[in-house]
Image (cartoon, coloured by chain):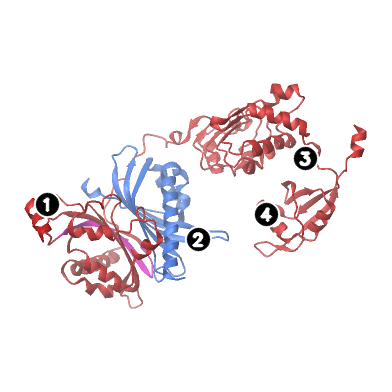
Amino acid sequence: MDFKTYVDQACRAAEEFVHIYYETMDKRRRVLPRLYLDTATLLWNGNVVTGMDGITNFFEMLPSSEFQINMLDCQPVHEQATPSQSTVLVVTSGTVKFDGSHPHYYNQNFLLTAQSTPNQTVWKIASDCFRFQDWSNN
Amino acid sequence: MVGEEQKEDSPQWFKVAITDGRKYKKPWLLSSIQSHCSVPFTPIDFHYVGLRAQFFISDASIASALKDVSDKILDDNSQKISIVVSPTIVPNCERNKLKPEKMEQLKVAMKKRYLASHQALDLQSFRFDPILVDHGIDMILNRKSCMDAALTIIEEDFPELLSLNLRNNKLYRLDSLSNIVEMAPKLQILNLSKNELKSAWELDKIKGLNLKELWLKGNPLCRNYSNNSTYVSTLLELFPKLTRLDGLELFSTLSCGNGKKKLPVCKGSVYGSDTLKSLIWQFLTEYYYIYDHGDRHVLLNTYHDNACFSLTVPFNSDDGVLGSLNLYSKSSRNMIKIKDSVPRTQLLKYTKTEIVDFLSALPKTQHDLSSFVVDTCVQTENMFYFSVNGQFKEVETSYLPHNCDFTRIFILNRTSNSSLCIVNDQLFVKDIRFDEPKTDLLIGHIIL
């Protein structure tokens, strides 16, 4: 595959993924863990969460959310870093309001891994890193 | 009556059974058969029976052509698919099919019950509808032939149906609704209350529907659940998009035990291990020393030959940016703003030379390493990947310096001789608006 094709594929995956992720996070939180690999790691404001049970529990305990995205970028991850695993880096930023808290700016980045089935390629989260922009000012 | 039957051409019916057909999805199965069959065919009453899939055909020559398809199709596991064709009596679905005149009356009755503004069809207690009673049409919706007739009319006349009310129709099973997903694909609201459904797994037969609202109360199945949350979670598993059940908002009732949910406490940097921490800090200190004080071209060999770099600023903050920081907004690859694939590729810097040339053109900076918060996301044999949130200052400009928040993501490849190189690098810069410059300085700049 030539470089431009990698980039296009990454862009498509990123846009589709981000649309699904934040809608699921805000409106169908219960099924959010399905977007993660069983082996995924979540870093949430310095809290480390691993494993499907941990992640499921974490999102159940998190108050309801309303996300707004102001920035989206993505890059195809170099093959040498993740051999035999098609990977995309997705970066987002914006604002979020959790129930019971004031709004925060946030930064988030994901590493998505391709899982191919006969009919389609599904991108799942291998790693999710989330931080409030202003956490150090709290 | 007898005379009429003699005049009609009675078609010869055949049952076409696909061995182990339960394994295959209907669209794939039918199109695979059609692609191997020499004549086009229309399957009547396709359904699964035990492990088989079967349908009926009313033409001898088509039946014969279908017989020839047996063992010609291979499934995903390279197993041959066997098709058995046998003559049969008129299938029930044909025999019980409503005559055209009755279908017309049924259509009238249903149209009367349709609320176009809400795309909603109210078929509750349908058997006792006055029009149907007057015309001697017995709509026992539990029967496949009756439900099929109703679904056919829905497919033809109300294809955009959003809401269907089947309350109080003595439904014992939902087999008759199994092709509702095809007939009413947009259905979101379904009322099955006050029927005779004994198990929530009846709903498994219609789980292809994207239901947002469901009513089930007044069915025997409700007595199976002493615990409300098991009831709710069973249904959510079948219909993940469900937001209202029996009239109640779902997520507000799913609160966990005691008290409101709270946000977890925010914590500092995450490194994974002390070794990795020192490695990361060594990298960051060296990288930013050069980046802030030296010629950024020196960074050439910290990058992989085919590394990628991109830079973004938030949407809406890149209007009215003054002076040197305009370069940030011009190069911003924010995909929320940039939709076209050509600029998206161009704005991605590829190869170490292109990257380092670009970085060297960016304004001079002074990074505050004490502000850095590091999140080490992934660590494998081949690589590690971390993000840095922190602040830097713009220096040497005619404007008052301003603190910028940034997030930088580095994906570093570990080579066999344990040297590191950057394969992916992403920079996000915030707060690039300046404070108001002093007026005389501004004028001086313009005159130049």
Identify the residue at horizontal 39%, vertical 42% (top origin).
A61
Percent position of residue B121, x then y: 60, 31
Crowding at dot 2, Cα within 10 Å, few <14 / some 14-19 / many 20+, comes out as some
| Residues at discs 1 and 2 in contact (Cβ within 8 Å) | no
Quarter of the figure with residue B66: bottom right
- Judged from the image, the secondary structure of the residue bearing numbered disc 3 is helix
Label 4 vs label 3: CA separation?
24 Å
- Residue type indicated by callout 1: Pro
Tag 1 and tag 2 share a subunit: no
Asked if badge 3 and badge 2 are on a common chain, one would say no
C-alpha gap between disc 1 and disc 2: 52 Å
Residue behind mark 3: B93
Left or right of residue B43: residue A40: left
* Chain painted in blue in the figure: A
> Residue B336's x, y, as percent?
36, 52
Give the residue number, with chain letter if any, for mark 1.
B437
Kind of residue at badge 2: Gln
Q: B167 or B14: nearer the eye? A: B14
Residue lying furthest bottom: B417
Quadrant placement of the N terminus of chain B: top right
Q: Nearer the viewer, mark 4 or mark 1?
A: 1
Q: Nearer the viewer's eye, disc 1 or disc 3?
A: 1
Colour of chain B in the rendered structure image: red
